[in-house]
Amino acid sequence: MKTCVVVFGREPIAGGGKSRLAVGIGAEAAARIYDALLEHTLETATGSGARVVLSLAETPSGSWARKLGVATEIQRGNDLGDRMDDAFARRFTEGERRVVVVGSDCPWFTTAHVAKASAKLGGADAVLGPASDGGYWLVAQRPPGLAMFSRIPWSSPDTLDRTRKRISALGGTWFELEELVDIDTLEDLELVLDHPRTPEQLR
């Protein structure tokens, strides 16, 4: 069944994000790393054969957006949970039956993850990709979707665990992919730089 991948991201400009990474390597270098991460994520999502939508935290500059080659939209909502709820709702309204939302800072994200998440939605209400910091780098749902992001503490070591409990409380089922690393800090970056799984554009 056809899948839609929604990539959550932002325009890679100095001071525009990755503040914890910037503390360790500077704002310009952090923006370059994020640019490579976003490029990798979009290439992977496109290479999976899925329809791809880049969901941006802020309105980008026109020249940057035009060269991306994928559909873009601006996120809506007060927090990350609201914005993911909205992204899923938009896709379900468009008729999508398998929707994968992925962050743009996971260097080990592959097309196989998209395929597996989509396949597992055949029997589960949701799929989670656990991150080593206690959050998740991927979340996938099928319609009508679950109210699974309500009262979740974001950017917390408890984010994943609270989401599991929320899905369970709703009577939903979920499947978990492998645990991967998000690049948020200098320590994260150092961990992945020399790893054989890390794409060349990040080395």
Image (cartoon, rainbow, N blue to C red):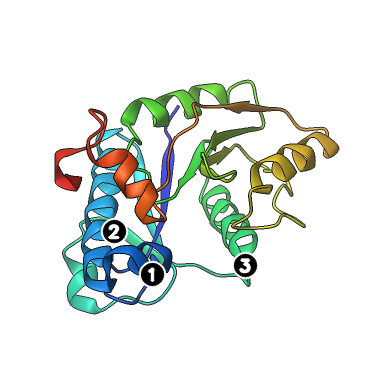
Secondary structure of the residue carrying tag 3 is: loop
Residue 156 placement, left or right of 107: right
- Residue 141 horizontal side relative to residue 12, left or right: right
For label 2, count other residues whose C-alpha is less than 10 Å away and answer few (under 14), some (14-19) or many (20+).
many
Give the amino acid type for the residue marked by disc 1 in the picture. Answer: Gly
Q: How far apart are marks 1 and 2 (CA)?
A: 9 Å
Picture coordinates of residue 62 (x, y %)? Answer: 23, 78
Write down the residue under mark 2: 34
For residue 160, which numbered disc appears in the image?
Answer: none
Other residues around mark 3 within 10 Å, as few (<14) / some (14–19) / many (≥20):
few
SS assignment at label 2: helix
Q: What element carries label 1?
A: loop
Q: Residue 17: which disc?
A: 1
Name the residue tied to disc 3.
79
> Mark 1–mark 2 contact, CB under 8 Å?
yes
Q: In which quarter of the image is the C terminus?
A: top left
| Residue type at the position of mark 2 | Tyr
**In this orientation, which residue lies closer to the viewer: 122 or 202?**
202
Who is closer to the viewer here, 4 or 135? 135
Q: Where is residue 104 in the image (x, y as percent from the top left)?
A: 37, 52
Mark nearer the viewer, 3 or 2: 2
User: Whole-percent x and y of residue 133?
Assistant: 54, 45
Query: Residue at the spot x=70%, y=40% of the render?
Result: 161
Query: Which residue type carries mark 3?
Result: Asp
